[in-house]
Amino acid sequence: MSVLIKGGRIITAADDYVADIYVEDETVTLIGESLDVGADKVVDATGKYVLPGLVDPHTHLDMPFGGTTTIDDVESGQTAAAFGGTTCHVDFIIQPQGSTFADAVGEWRAKANGKQVIDMGYHMAVTDLAEGGTLEELASLPDEGITSYKLFMAYKGALMVDDETLFRTMEVAARTGALVMVHAENGDAIDVLVKRALAEGKTEPRYHALTRPPETEGEATNRAIQLSRVAGSPLYVVHVSCKEAIEPIELARDKGWAVWGETCTQYFFIDYSFLEKPNFEGAKYVYTPPPRAKENQEHLWNAVRTDKLSAISTDHCAFLWDGQKTLGKDDFSKIPNGGPGLENRLHMIHEFGVRTGRISLNRMVELLATSPARLFGLYPRKGTIAVGSDADIVVFDPEKKLTITAANQHSKTDYNLYEGTEVTGSPEFVLLRGNVLVENDQLVASPGIGEYVARAKFGQELRARSAVTQ
Ligand code: URP
Ligand code: ZN
Ligand code: ZN
């Protein structure tokens, strides 16, 4: 199958120019002005942006969490992603307590089998080095293409690890070429605050934020940074939500340390006041770290503009409001933590980042595709448009109007964080490795088209397919 995308404005992290793109089989094989080639399919992209397929480095599909399981499985989550222009994501395998890493990998690969709509890789969330996986086994994962280890410094009694586990994992990463990711919050302090609030009868959703003050995120961020320095591992701090966590990352980056930070779409738009919505509606916004005071939003825009923060993910961890979030009707600590977002990252960042002049189109592509691809060993196969790269391409209509609503979303959840938001600009055609994925607002390809991607080790490049097969 060959595809010719004609006359679009190609935007990568570095470039912005009008040209044609010729795709043969799975890769981009030619880019040039007025290409004189025949193709099985010709797409007129005049007046449209042509973007690399986006990469979401932080999602939770079909994940048991908070006494239930996320509502989006691989098929529904990836379908939502495809409509939002995301063609590759990296999901979290959570090591069940007492389980080996190999068993955990097997379990997660089985969940994806036959359901994949887009390409995906995995991070390994380490929960147990005492009874479950060994350090040796952990060290072997990067050779299988799982080149990042995630540790939760919060969720005491569930996913949280102690500093010894965190530090030992960092030491393994330093020698195996893995990137260490942290959910940075002080889980012990938060546990004290949660128990006290509940003992005082404070059960509503807003106490989720009031028991997780920004200082607990700042402290854990700084602790992880300092420990990674001692261990000699690179560090990526996920879902940064506030000034207190941006500051230590900024300091580390100013010093030239191997530290990166990510924020998520929702932190630019949802603030603490959403948790106060009546009739338990606030539970829709119970995710962790929690929605913060509004002034943090300008700190976040500034941080992504200036590369204090290097990526924007979704942390898509969707639950039904009616039937799952309601598990915490009488106790905010029982509300499953997480929110949906895979479909609307590009819509929201284009509308409120690019169209308002906060960030450039190039920077948007860098934050949503190139930088995650580079950090997580997917570049240059993913995250850019270049000869030899996978033909993961989004034709984006900058004039298309859309009202974001749960009624027309592809996630299985029953609400949307951005309900009623009107945006101008939306993907209209999406290719995955040269296969038409979305066209005329329909998913054209069938589940099973997506592939597992073995990622390169930290700092190394994932060789383009054409190079691999030569
Ligand atoms: O609330 C969230 N973020 N749920 C997903 C798990 C995590 O902490 O990333
Ligand atoms: Zn987290
Ligand atoms: Zn997460």
Image (spheres, rainbow, N blue to C red):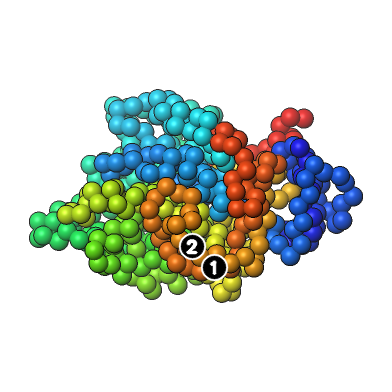
**Left or right placement of residue 308 versus residue 275 in this view:** right
Tag shown at residue 448: none
Residue at 47% from the left image edge and 30% from the top image edge: 109
1 or 2: tag closer to the N-terminus:
2
Query: Residues under labels 1 and 2: Cα distance?
Result: 8 Å
With 311 as the anchor, is 274 left or right in this view? left
Q: Secondary structure at mark 2?
A: loop
Q: Which mark is residue 404?
A: 2
Residue at position x 29%, y 48% in the image: 324
Can you see residue 289? yes
Quarter where residue 143 is shown: top right
Which quadrant of the figure contains the N terminus? top right
**Disc 1 and disc 2 in contact, CB within 8 angstroms:** yes
* Badge 2 amino acid: Ile
Q: On screen, 209 above or below 371?
A: below
Give residue 312's position: percent from left, percent from top. Answer: 50, 57
The residue under the point 45% across, 28% down is 110
Q: Quadrant of the C terminus?
A: top right
Give residue 12's quadrant in the image.
bottom right
Position above or below: 470 against 370: above
List the residue tagged with mark 1: 423
Judging depth in this view, the residue of 219 and 398 nearest the camera is 398
Amino acid type, mark 1: Val
